């Protein structure tokens, strides 16, 4: 797949990431049941993944890949995803969309710089040079400006 398409999809994921907290917080507020809203969100996600699995299997008729050993740290990703949704349900409405997403994305980028630098959780090593670190610092400063004003 061409790199510009991959970056385009990443940008679309970012737009979806900006919209989702408002959707989830509104669902929690209107129903008065934040946990039920969270369960509904995850049930819908599971349904989407099941549909995607069917489509991928139809397009790729090869036999299922052999099971490989999975590192222990690969399993709790769903727990982390649940934590993000819980934050959307309980926090995003209190601080606003811009501050919430700014914090989430900036923490993700700064954390990713560290993950890349040390080659953790399956990522290849990418040195945290001065420009990457400066980018992280500028993001922190930008989020501070968004949150304060």
Image (cartoon, grey):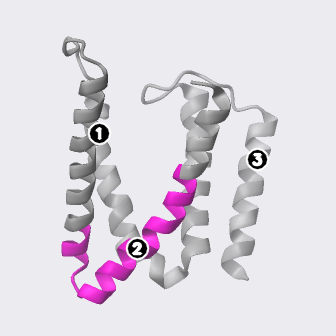
Residue at the location (27% across, 49% down)?
Answer: 48
Mark 1, residue position: 52
- Image: 129 above or below 100: above
Within-10-Å neighbours for mark 1: few <14, some 14–19, many 20+: few
For residue 23, the mark is 2
Q: Residue 136's spot in the image, x, y percent?
A: 71, 49
Residue at the location (53% across, 81% down)?
Answer: 95
Mark 3, residue position: 135
Left or right of residue 144: residue 116? left
Spatial CA span between label 2 and label 1 = 22 Å
Q: Quadrant of residue 54?
A: top left
Dot 1: element: helix
Left or right of residue 121: residue 106? right
Q: Which residues are magenta?
A: 13-38
Q: Is residue 34 magenta?
A: yes
Within-10-Å neighbours for mark 2: few <14, some 14–19, many 20+: some
Q: Quadrant of residue 99?
A: bottom right
């Amino acid at each position: 797949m061409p790199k510009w398409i991959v970056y385009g999809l990443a940008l679309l994921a970012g737009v979806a990431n900006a919209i989702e907290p408002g959707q989830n917080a509104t669902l929690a507020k209107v129903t008065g049941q934040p946990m039920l809203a969270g369960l509904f969100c995850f049930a819908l996600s599971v349904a989407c993944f099941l549909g995607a699995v069917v489509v991928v299997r139809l397009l790729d008729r090869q036999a299922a890949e052999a099971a490989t050993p999975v590192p222990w740290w690969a399993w709790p990703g769903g727990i982390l995803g649940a934590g993000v949704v819980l934050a959307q349900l309980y926090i995003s409405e209190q601080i606003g969309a811009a501050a919430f997403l700014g914090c989430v994305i900036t923490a993700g980028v700064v954390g990713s710089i560290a993950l890349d630098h040390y080659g953790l959780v399956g990522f290849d090593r990418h040195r945290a040079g001065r420009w990457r670190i400066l980018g992280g610092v500028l993001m922190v400063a930008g989020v501070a400006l968004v949150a304060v004003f």
